[in-house]
Image (tube, coloured by chain):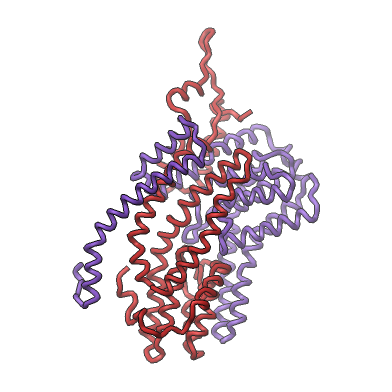
Amino acid sequence: MSSDIMPAVDPAVPTKKLDLKDVKSAFWRWFFGAQIAWNYETMQSGGVVLSLGPALRKIHSGDGMFKRSLDEHFAFFNTNPWTGTIALGATLAVEEQVDPAEPEASREAVTSIKTALMGPLAGIGDAIVFVIPMTITGAIAAYMAQQGSWIGILFPIIYSVLMIFVRRWLYLMGYLQGSKFVTTLAHQLRSLADAAGVLGVMVIGALISSVVTVHIPTVFSQGQATVALQSTLDMIMPNLVPALLTGLVYWLLGKKWMNSTRAIGLIIAVAFVGYFIGLFGTAA
Amino acid sequence: MEVTFLQMAAVVLFSAIIVYDQMNTQLLVIGGKVIAGLGVGLILGDPVTGLAVGAVLELMSLGVGAYGGASVPDYWLGAITGTMVAVMSGKGADFGVLVGVPLSVLAIQLDVLVRTATTFFVHKAKAAADRGNVAVAYRWLWNGYTFWFLKYIVPVVLLFAIGADAMSAFVNWVPQWFIAGFSIAGGLLPVVGIAILLRFMNTKAHLPFLIFGFALVAYLKVPMVGVAVFGLAAAILVFRAASKQAQAAAVPSASNAALSTVGVNNDEL
């Protein structure tokens, strides 16, 4: 994030037209309507307009500038709804600095900060606040649900509720510090992503050996002695089949022609073939 | 089983909440298929079946997300409809998965339709804003969720219209081998969610921890929450080491920033 995406804008200049209450209200409007009119053409533009609208009305005294500003925010926008709040807060801060005497340059500053921040924030956001916590808390919830307990769903719900405060805080920090905030956070975020990745990967490892279930009824008999294929496999390594299947799908997903939906089709096919040749059996 | 009108209304309302929350407030997204299955199960009087259907769909879709708006199977809808069929037909969770998975995949088409059609609402909103009528613009945007609601409500209402009797008849018509195959598939499908996650994460760098987590359960039978506690300890250690490294690396770049504020041209850096 280089400093030149905020040309002619100095956050220290006392041109604040909003108070924190306006910014908080902009956050809540985003919270309740971030992707309310998600569409292929402009994706989250509807949420942006809903969130910023009243604050923009307060910032721009002239009807012309207000209309123009709204019009520009109807343009394409897409980010992670949780961390992307930084981009929206920063956008409000730059909107405040729009100079009616010099509309072209200052309007461009608004668009640049919004679009410059949305991509990186989506990447960071998807990993740190979403996918990794989803793995950890979602997997625990699903694992406990498999055991017939509903208690596990408290983990993801509590996490998501606590994150409301983080989402709001990021919006405010985006407004107060703009892109500078992202730069200061960048290093810490990378360390955090690394650490969260370790926790996530460990839970995934545990998932392989706890939630994948396969029954192998095949029994070899030689004279009097019978050996169950399952116990032979277990002697090599417990949960060997789930580990091998995970490795296979992981490898296949690296291929260009493979996607998650096809992988699911493939696994269903494997299950049927395994059933017909007698390799896999049902639980009972 | 017979479903009362009140139960139908409750499932429709619950689905509406799920599909609204999924895109906006996002408090029930993580673990969402378990929550969806449990909710519908509770309303229809069989929460355990709902949990079981939700768990399979959650696990097979752990790493699947609509990042950047790509259309992926709607496993939430699969959990809702799968639980409905499982409970109403009385055939249990395996059968719910059997119905829920294909319905999730079919819902891709609905998803594309909804995401395209909603463009209309945004155009209307923009036109209103251009006329200076902001209140009307906001209303068009809020109404932009109409099709999103329909995406869930229509399949749910259709399933209720089909009714438990027809479902049971369908269940009895489905051959035994088909149900057995899907029951096995239900046990294997979490592999897909797991592999997608591993693709998403920096698995090569973190491979030792993957092995560690696997072995904790495979050999020591540590429960999932226990593995997370071990993982937390490892994560703290990694965080400390990584931030120390980052600090060391940040020193030169911080001085660059200081230079640039006093006006030194740092283009070559």
Which chain: purple? Answer: B
Q: What color is chain A drawn in?
A: red
Q: Is residue A123 above or below residue B136?
A: above
Furthest residue in direction top, as rendered: A223
Residue B200: % across, % down: 42, 50
Q: Is residue A41 visible?
A: no
Residue A99: % across, % down: 39, 88
Of B163 and A234, the residue lying toward us: A234
Q: Is residue A204 left or right of residue B142?
A: left
Q: Is residue B11 visible?
A: yes
Q: Residue at x 47, y 40 (%)?
A: B227
Residue A201: % across, % down: 42, 44
Residue A110: % across, % down: 40, 78
Q: Is residue A279 left or right of residue B15?
A: left
Q: Is residue A98 left or right of residue B105?
A: left
**Count the marks: how many?**
0
